[in-house]
Structures are given as C-alpha cells and as structure tokens.
Image (cartoon, rainbow, N blue to C red):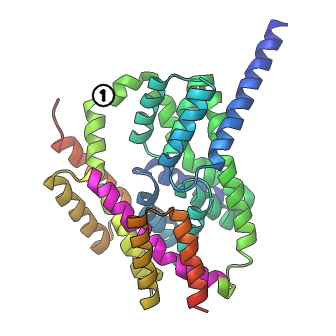
Amino acid sequence: MILIQLFLIFAQIGLFAFGGGYAILPLIEKEIVNNFHWLTYKEFLEVVTISQLTPGPISINAATFVGYKVGGILGSIVATVSVCLPSVIIILIVVRFLKKFETNIWVTNILKGLRPAVVALIASAAYSIIKGGGISDIKGIIIGVVSFLLLRSKKLNPILILILAGIVGVIVYI
Amino acid sequence: MNVKEDTRSKLDLLLSIFIVFFKIGVFTWGGGYAMLPLIKNEVVEKKKWIGSEDFIDGIGVSQSIPGPIAINTATFVGYRICGTLGSIVAVTGAILPSFVTIILVAMFFLGFRELTAVQDFFKGANPAIVALIISAVIDIGRDALKRYREVIIASILLFLLLYFKIHPILAIVISAILGLFLGEKK
C-alpha cells in the first residue's frame, strides 16, 4: 500500500516538475510534509540541504530519501523510478515529432505562460523556509545576508557557501 | 554468427552509454544546466553519438517538458543512440550515483541527525539555502518576467500560494491556461 502511494505521489511530482530545481519545493512540501506526513518540516529542510550537497536533482534526491525513510530500499527504488517516469515517457513520445513539438504554437504559449508560475513557486519556497524557522534569530539573518552577498558579488560556488554557512552554524550555535 | 556479433556490439554500446551517463551523474552537482557542457563534451564531441544540432534540439525539448533537464537530456540522447532501451540505460546510469549517495546518507544520517553539531550545521546552512533560493528568484525572474503582464501574474500567483495556500499544481495549471489564452495566436 505504501509503495502504491509512493508511486502515485512521486509520479505526480515528476509530472509537474517544471522550471527545474527549487520550483518543485512547494509541491514536495505540500504532498510529503502537509498531506502525507512522510517528513516533518525540519526533515524537509534537511533533505533540501543534503540534496544541494550531493549529486543529482532535488526532486530525485527527495524521492530517494523519502522512499527510503517510509519504505526501505524498495520504497526508495519505487519513489525514484516514479519521479522520473513521466518525463521519460513524455520524451519518448515527443522525440518522434521533435520539430513539430518545438514550434507548436500551443506548446510555446503554454511554456511562456508557465514562466510566472515558476518564479512565484520559487519565491514561495523562500518565504516558506523563512517562515518555517529556517531563519530563526539574528545570527541566521546575518548568515543569510552574508551568503547572499557572497553569492551575488563574489560569484562563489553555492556548495562552498552552503558548507561554510554550516560550519559557521556549528561554531556560533554551540 | 552474425546475430551473435550484433547482440554483442549492442551490449557494448549499451554498456558505454551506461558508463558515460554514470560519469555525468557523478558530476552533476547543483543543478542540471551546469552539466549540459559536460554531456555535450561526452556525447557530441568525444563519442560522436549525436550531432551538435540534434543535441541542441534535444535540450530545447528537455527544457519544455517537466522533470530535471539532466534526466530529460539523458532520455533523449539515449533514445537517439539506441532506442527506448538506450534511454532507459542512460537514465539509469545518470540517476545511479545520486541514488546510491542518498541511500548511504539516509542510512548513515538517520542515526546521526540528532547530534547537536549536525543540527547546528543545518541551522547555519538553512539561511544560506534561503539566500540561494532568493538568488534564483532574481536570476529566473529577470529572464522570465519580461512584461508587466508576467510580473502581475507572478505576483497574483504568489499571493494565492502564500495567503490562500492554493495547491502548487493549481498555480501551474492556472498559468498554463493563461498562457494559452493570452499568448500569440500564430
């Protein structure tokens, strides 16, 4: 039963994973944290951080982690396969009439239409993490602002910034 | 004899598809776009499995359908080289490194996560995650919101997401429908 649920939820997440990366976070939060309680909000934040520090896209990392947590190795396989399945199937269909697909007016209009949603979804992910306790005190605000400035002005690698911020956390929160 | 040789060369091909995409999977840290030059280098320049133009078309499609761009590109390239079986092998190879890593982290981490130092690490990393996401909003917003109409739609959707807690899928569906009705007719 849990395997069927994992399959359905992660296939749904895979089907609506537009815009890459962070845009999928609100959907994962809604289904995995709020509806199914497979992760607490705190665990969800941990998975986001872990996924940034390990290879692979967020949606797939989240699927593997949640699948393992609720259904062991088999659960992680089911969740990982099902999150990939929709896009693999769509590509295998579309690849047969590639040029027509890319220039189809319906397709381009829908894609252009999706852009504002992708921005709104990513912005809501940031808001939700701040509100959910991701930044809880003045130290957090300082770490966030400094990370942001390093990212924008020095163009430091995001993984490096994340590790530095984590180490600063270990030092200042001791 | 011929049939045997065919099978064997097909197996060789599938194996090298697997190895190339496994390698790509190992080096895909922090977002799919970073890996596109790597995929291109391997499959277009080194292996010459597909042409440069075909590859660019494939990226176009990979961006327009749901799912991580790395996985979509692997599916496309795998299909071009060796049909449906090729795409399955390519995707499996691309996913396997992150799959194994996360399984190890999950096994190892679930026992360690209550340690104070680990919790403090996450407490420090969370604000940095927020910074990364806000930075992505700025970069993607600059590309995606070129007209006032798009800014207004994005603002309304954000409002609906935050205050009315609408389902993220509903936000996607609303904007797709708006795109259909407000988009160019020809």
Q: Amino acid at mark 1?
A: Thr
x%, y% of residue A138? 42, 90
Q: Is residue A143 above or below residue B81?
A: below
Q: Residue at x 74, y 58 (%)?
A: A73
In the image, residue A149 lies in the stretch drawn in magenta: no
Q: Disc 1 is attached to a residue of which chain?
A: A
Toward which corner of the image does residue A112 lie, by quadrant?
A: top left
| Along the viewing direction, whichever of A95 and A8 lies nearer the viewer | A95
- In the current view of this chain or complex, which residue is farthest to the right? B1
| Along the viewing direction, whichever of A49 and A45 lies nearer the viewer | A49
Looking at the image, residue A6 sits to the left or right of residue B163; the answer is right
Q: Which residues are magenta?
A: B118-143
Q: Residue at x 19, y 58 (%)?
A: B151
| Along the viewing direction, whichever of A150 and A77 lies nearer the viewer | A150
Residue under label 1: A103
Task: Name the quadrant of the N terminus of chain A.
Answer: bottom right
Looking at the image, residue A173 sits to the left or right of residue A94; the answer is right
Q: Is residue A170 above or below residue A124?
A: below
Give SS at disc 1: helix
- In the current view of this chain or complex, which residue is farthest to the bottom? A174
Q: Residue at x 81, y 13 (%)?
A: B5
Q: Residue at x 54, y 45 (%)?
A: B35
